[in-house]
Image: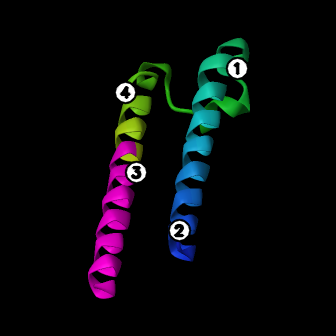
Amino acid sequence: MAMGTDQVVGLSLIVVSLIIFTYYATWVILLPFIDSQHVIHKYFLPQPMLLPSPVAAGLLLLLFVGLFIIYVILKNQKVIKKAQ
């Protein structure tokens, strides 16, 4: 059973990934149809960063998910050892 902090960390990982997905989808799908002089363009990275930025974000997300899984596994092993 997940503890309170585990649930908060898991929920924060979901929220961060949703924010990244929304940002990238807006950048890729909507931004090409908006005039390049529009003020919204200053909130997004330049077009040449289209490929490297999601790769970096994906790697960071996988790193944090992996660290979270390792943390939960080690925490559960400590609980099992205390019960014995």
Asked if residue 31 lies left or right of residue 79, the reply is right
In the image shown, does 55 or 40 lie closer to the viewer?
A: 55
In the rendered structure, which amino acid carries the disc numbered 3? Answer: Val
The alpha-carbon separation of the residues under discs 3 and 1 comes to 29 Å
In the rendered structure, which amino acid carries the disc numbered 2? Answer: Ala
Q: Earlier in the sequence, mark 3 or mark 1?
A: 1
Does residue 78 belong to the magenta stretch? yes
Mark 4 touching mark 1, by CB under 8 A?
no
The answer to whether one can see residue 60 in this image is yes
- Point 38% across, 53% down: residue: 64
Mark 2 touching mark 3, by CB under 8 A?
no
Q: Residues within 10 Å of mark 1 (few under 14, many from 20)?
A: few
Range of residues picked out in magenta = 62-84
Placement of the C terminus among the 4 image quadrants? bottom left
Foreground mark, 3 or 1, reads 3
Note whether 50 is above or below 58 in the view shown: above
The alpha-carbon separation of the residues under discs 3 and 4 comes to 20 Å
The answer to whether one can see residue 36 in this image is no
Which residue has dot 3 on it? 65
Q: Looking at the picture, how far across and down is residue 35, in whole percent?
A: 72, 16
Which residue has dot 1 on it? 30
Asked if residue 6 lies left or right of residue 36, the reply is left
The alpha-carbon separation of the residues under discs 2 and 3 comes to 15 Å
Which residue has dot 2 on it? 2
Q: Residues within 10 Å of mark 2 (few under 14, many from 20)?
A: few
Q: Earlier in the sequence, mark 1 or mark 2?
A: 2
Which residue has dot 4 on it? 52
Foreground mark, 1 or 2, reads 2
Label 2, secondary structure: give it: loop
